[in-house]
Amino acid sequence: MTNAVVNSDKKSLNWVALKVAHFCLQYGALILVVLLVLGIALVSPDFLTPGNLINVLVQNAAIGIVALGMTFVIIVQGIDISVGGNIALASLLASIAMSSFHLPWYVGILIFLIMSTLVGWINGFSVSKLGMTPFLVTLATLTVTRGLVLAIGNGQSVYGLPPEIKFLGSGRLGPVPVPIVIMLLAFLVGHILLSRSVFGRQVLAIGGNADAARMQGLNVNRTRTLAYVVCGAFVSLAAIVLAGRYNAAMPDMAEGFEFSAIAMAVIGGTSMAGGEGSAMGTFVGVLVIGLINNALNLLGVSVFYQGVARGAVIFFAILLDTLRRHLAESEK
Amino acid sequence: MTETTLLELIGISRQFPGVLALDHVDFELAAGEIHGLVGENGAGKSTLMNIIGGVVLPDNGTIRLHGQPVEIANPAHAHTLGIGFIHQELSLFPNMDVASNIFFSDLPQRVPGLVDIKQIKQKTRAILDRMGLTEVQPTQKLGSLSPGRKQLVEIARCIAQHNEILVLDEPTSSLSDRETQTLFNIVRELKNQGVSIIFVSHRLDEVFEVCDRVTVLRDGKKIDTVATKQVTHQELVRMILGHEIAASSADVVRKPGEVVLRVESLSRGRLVKNVSFDLHRGEILGITGLLGSGRTELARAIFGLDRMNSGKVWIDGNRVYIHSPENAISHGLGFITENRREEGLLIEKPIVDNIVLANLRSFSNLFGWVSSQKERQAAEQQKANLRIVTPSIDRLVKYLSGGNQQKVVLAKWLQTTPRILILDEPTRGIDVGAKEEVYHLIQQIAAQGTGVIYITSEIPEVVRLCDRVLVMRDGAISTSMDRGNFTGHEILMAATGGNVS
Amino acid sequence: MKTDDIGIVKLRNAAWVQQLTQLTLRYGTYLLLLLLCAVVALLSQSFFTVSNLTNVVLQTVDIGIIAVGMTFVIIVCGIDVSVGAILALSSAFGVRAMIMNGQPWYVGVLIMLAISTFVGFINGFSVSWLGMPAFLVTLATQAVARGLVTIGSGGRIWNGLPVFYNIVGMGSVGPIPNPIIIMIVVFILGHLLLSKTSFGRKVYAVGSNPKTARVSGINVKRVVLLSFVLCGFLSGLSGLVLTSRMDAFTPSVGTGYEFSAIAACVIGGASLFGGEGNMGGTLVGVLIMGVINNALNLLGVSAFYQDVARGLVIFLAVLLDTIRKHYTKIGD
């Protein structure tokens, strides 16, 4: 595969080490999943029960969908840390519409979709057309959306959502919980979009070599904005699932989602440098984080420490990605 | 091979601030021919190609394609006109597979919006086979290919887009011999299919090998277009250089002293192979060679910017281990990089800030307190000595001309009073007047006892300034010549692969 | 990103726009401050009183001290969103040591400054040596630090600090409260460090062009590291002053401080693209933020909407900076 590696054929030990490192970093996430499953099963008897495993998927359905959306944004060398606020705001507005104004559930869904996609569009527009830094733009949108949630909702939660929404978050289709179905469908769509569609190729192209893409006639700004819009669309889906699960819109819902979503995407192979990433990879990343959180719960780790764990996990995920990139660079 | 003219440029002129890049140049490309374009750096090759590629617009002149006048407005337009341009920095997507790279602007779709994987694989396979790249897989990630293969994929992209005209800009600079042959075979095959290729290169041996005709540019003017079978290597070199450049007798005569720098067996990957040489006090040692010959990499390794795989360095007889520029500077080294905007200057900052940058310690006391007064004095001094044209030392460097910018870089290094000064393409992008000043300054510096390493691809400079010259090719020193024993022609021959008679 | 694609650039060719831009860039911040003060004075009678104005400046002390450190970080082309969390963390453990373990006041000071400097070191090390992106690293340290605050303080509020802190927080020299004096001293020292020492020169160089700086013999990694360390240290110092003023420690202290600090620096002329900025500008930026906050309070804007306002301010500040960069970098 890599002709370039042959350069350093001075000591074959060096070469072997590189090959191993390469393999680890490429399939590391999958290996990690396997190790985690084995490790936790050994330590905790409650782990390998169908109830627990299904629970892991349900708990991480919403954030997993967010991670999927985040993948698109990171591929175009951007980031979106407003996802949590986005979810909270969309949920609040939709919930108010449905419970206070008694609008039907499908109108509520529409509000979810429109609101989140709109925020995604604002992010995308600011980044591509206005040329602003993605981190700070989405930091601003995060503050504004969270602020609006508190201001409009007066710091209160909104209850009384229609049963259809509750079904989407807590119901079952046969033996399978609906959130899992939604998540799987979302990942399927994400996979098709990213790996099989023209749009996906364009997104990857921008991440790989935006200038070349422009020279070949691609409207880079529009495609980049669309990546953020797609993220917003997936975020709306996540909001629906989350609101359905809580059967309410709460001001602090989706708190900290941005961290975990980024960590999931990065562990799953999405590179912060852009141009790399896949739906399937992110799914593996979701499993990794989900399993780690599950392990922390089963082992009775206090909730307080989970905040610390979340930060630590994202730190190591980024470190991993940085190492991955250094390795790729040094092979040139 | 037909004789019909495919592309014609008539009376093309283009001016850039301070330099007339092209002066009423005519260029004619026939259908189904491989046409070489040669000339020294600054002769106008890049500008001419950029005009054909739509990157730059001509000030005057006409362009005719298939006999019809056209204006090539931008690269995308050139693209639609059937012109494919392969630059040195490839415009490919290393993160995507070969197939997607080749068909990016025209992805086959069975369902609108979705890529038809089967078809794209088939089509890619077909093109790759046609090019003899049977081992390359359509699904292979582009980044995993060697530079040579990547270049061929870019050509495959042009084939897929049915380009009539292909411009190859220094295509073999990072290719192995075998890859170069593959490239030539493909280029010949394309010619048989009626594609016309413009082959821009410094490697005259290759031009002779693969081109039907060759056009020589010099100082923005077209000198001649000849059939390669009807001209010798030596004649071509003469056309490129013009009259023989003799060492000017007005130049300062120096007597080089003891060895100040000694390099032994320096290697760095594929780029620098086992290079050894000495540098004497007060000597101007030229290092020349074509793009990709390893000169810059050699300098960077010596200066501690990049790590060397192996090698030993002695300064004034003492073994030194230089692992960072900070280190190098403390040992008396200075390095003017080839890209002053990226690595030589703080472009948004004033002249004075730039001049003091490499030697801050000398302006500050124990506590790190900097004396603005001393800084300004030093900067004013340098401004006067080097004759930097500017109303004030507070002017931002970005507003200076290329020549003055380079003087600022030089001033910065002179502030460190280096024992050894390395210059990499110091007169690139500078007008003639400024060049003369720079030559004069460098000779002064050498006369004061500094050992100077002068890296350049401009042969006249080598002949004029250097006491000795090392010619590099493919990462190793191929020839070494002493003053009085070399001519510009011989150097160019050695660098471009001819035999020095 | 190719500048031609960004819509704003098309405006730039109008002559009047160019002249206006020049004026704005040079004196804009000062004018803005004066303008704001004028507007607020019109809107509210209580603004131009000595006690209110003193109060305004007093309120800016926390952000002000942090902004000095943030200026270094931003000039060096980094960013630090963990400053608020560092403030909280260092204060938490310092106060805890004094109140729960009965340590004397100087141990408290030592702990606060040591912890904050250490976190600054972790940030700096990860960015400079490990090559990780600054915003994500500091986002991670923020999460971890906040989590640790919750653990360390157990969610409680502490009061009753040793007398030393009362003097620092409540005392005054003549009519000027001590905290303001401290801030002024910090600004002066910061200014001297930035504009009069070789370290300051190096900071500007690294921020303008790290490659050139490196070739010129500057130890880029060390400069970046020290900038983050300084920022961490000053966050701890700010916490010390804040805790003294409040004579208490609240776990949620420092939340959102990073926004205000970043906004203050950017408004004051520091560019997020590195290489530009100065202490005077940051001071004005801090005062502007203070006046805005004061105005929102005087006008009775709910705390919730203040968050929204803060987000908008950051957005505008970043937009301003982007426009600034694209105008001045090309053309002229």
Image (tube, grey):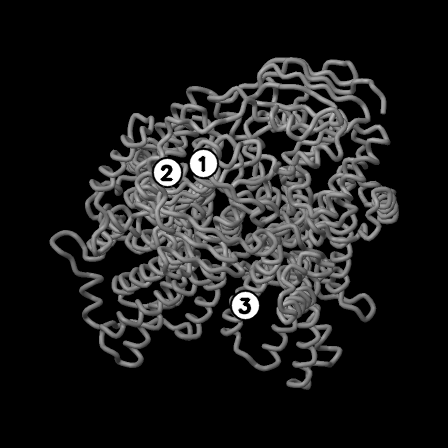
Question: Measuring 55% from the left and 42% from the top, which residue is drawn there?
Answer: B471
Secondary structure of the residue carrying tag 3 is helix
User: Residue B405 location, x and y as percent?
Assistant: 40, 33
Q: Quadrant of the C terminus of chain C?
A: top left
For the N terminus of chain C, which image quadrant? top right
Do dots 1 and 2 share one subunit? yes
Residue position marked by numbered label 1 in the rendering: B426
Find the distance from the CA under tag 3 to the CA under tag 1.
52 Å
Q: Amino acid at mark 2?
A: Leu
**Which residue is disc 3 drawn over?**
A310
- Which chain is disc 2 placed on? B
C-alpha gap between disc 1 and disc 2: 9 Å
Tell me, yes or no, if residue C318 can be seen here. no
Give the Cα separation between the discs numbered 2 and 3: 51 Å
Q: Amino acid at mark 3?
A: Arg
| Labels 1 and 2 touching (C-beta < 8 A) | yes
Q: Are marks 2 and 3 on the same chain?
A: no
Observer-nearest of C247 and B91: B91
Residue count near mark 3 (Cα–Cα under 10 Å), binned few <14, some 14–19, many ≥20: many
Query: Residue B322 at x, y = what percent?
Result: 42, 58
| Callout 3 and callout 1 share a chain | no
Residue identified by numbered label 2: B410
Residue C40, placed above or below residue C129: above
